[in-house]
Structures are given as structure tokens and as C-alpha cells.
Image (cartoon, grey):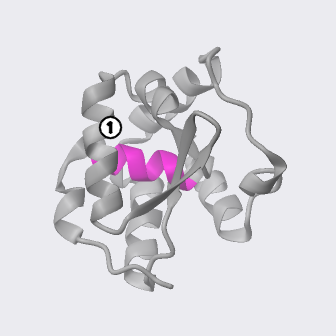
Amino acid sequence: MTMHPNIDLIGDPTRRRMLTLLAVEGEVCVCEFVAALDELQPSVSRNLGLLRDGGWITSRREGTWIHYRLARLPRWARTLIEALVGGGVPPDALRAARIRLAAFQGRPPRAAASGNAEPAPTRRKLLRAAA
């Protein structure tokens, strides 16, 4: 089922960076967002809750971890996220977040069922745009 996201939620720069990071990483947990965005956990959790309630993201539980990913979005929302990856979020900010995320030693393991073993075609396109 395709969600109908609340566009007002992406007025916040932290939430735009979160959506962009999800677009290029596929799936991210709270602790990874904290490390990548250099934000406090309560702020990250609050913004994730708003994005989830607003229809932008979904979550799944794996043991004690909650992993977030982009929801099934309508074309206009996917286009908007592609624009964020393509420069709507400053490339230096995205690059710095991805470097911090890669250096983060507390990343949880992901089961093969998470879908991150091989990027989907759209995700591959976004990864190239973010490089």
C-alpha cells in the first residue's frame, strides 16, 4: 500500500537529512542516526516518530533493534527524495553523515531478510547520485 506522506514534515533540515540518509543507506536504526547526524537520541527519536506518523518511513523490529526505511511512497514523494539526494541536502552534509556512519562501531547486524544484501535499482541510482 502506498502511503500519502505529509509534505509539511520535510521543512525541517534534520528530517530532510534523515530521509536522504535512508534513501542512500536503505535501512538505519536510531543509534546509527545519532552517530551519522551528530544529534541527540531524543531528537532523533522524535523526528523518526514524526516521519513515521507522517507516512514517510516505516519500521521493523529485529530483537532489540528498530530499523527504519522509506515507506512505499507516491511518485511525487520519491521524486522529491531523489532531489534531496541529488543536492537538496548539501552534498557535504550528506558525505559527512555517511563518513560518520561508516566509522560508527556500534552498528547492529542485519538479517538477510532486511533487504540490504543487494540495493534495489532505485537505491542504486540514488547511491550513484550521492557519491
Give the x, y percent position of residue 121. 73, 69
- Residue 32 belongs to the span the image colors magenta: no
The answer to which image quadrant residue 79 occupies is bottom left
Give the x, y percent position of residue 85. 47, 54
Q: As drawn, is 116 to the left or to the right of 123?
A: right
Q: Quadrant of the C terminus?
A: top right
Above or below, comparing residue 121 to residue 43 in the picture: below
Q: Can see residue 131? A: no
Q: Nearer the viewer, residue 45 or 12?
A: 45
Give the x, y percent position of residue 42. 27, 28
Write the start and end of the magenta stretch as one range. 15-23
Q: Residue at x 65, y 61 (%)?
A: 123
Q: As drawn, is 70 to the left or to the right of 44?
A: right
Q: Nearer the viewer, residue 106 or 120?
A: 106
Q: What amino acid type is highlighted by mark number 1?
A: Ser
Secondary-structure class at tag 1: helix
Q: Residue at x 37, y 21 (%)?
A: 38
The answer to which image quadrant residue 63 occupies is top right
> Furthest-front residue in view?
63
Residue at numbered disc 1: 45
Q: Main secondary structure of the magenta part?
A: helix
Neighbour class for label 1 at 10 Å: few (<14), some, many (≥20)? some
Q: Nearer the viewer, residue 131 or 124?
A: 124
Q: As drawn, is 25 to the left or to the right of 35?
A: right
Q: Residue at x 45, y 34 (%)?
A: 30
Q: Residue at x 27, y 44 (%)?
A: 47
Give the x, y percent position of residue 109. 73, 32
- Residue 20 belongs to the span the image colors magenta: yes
Above or below, comparing residue 106 to residue 58 in the picture: above
Above or below, comparing residue 81 to residue 21 in the picture: below
Q: Can see residue 126? A: yes
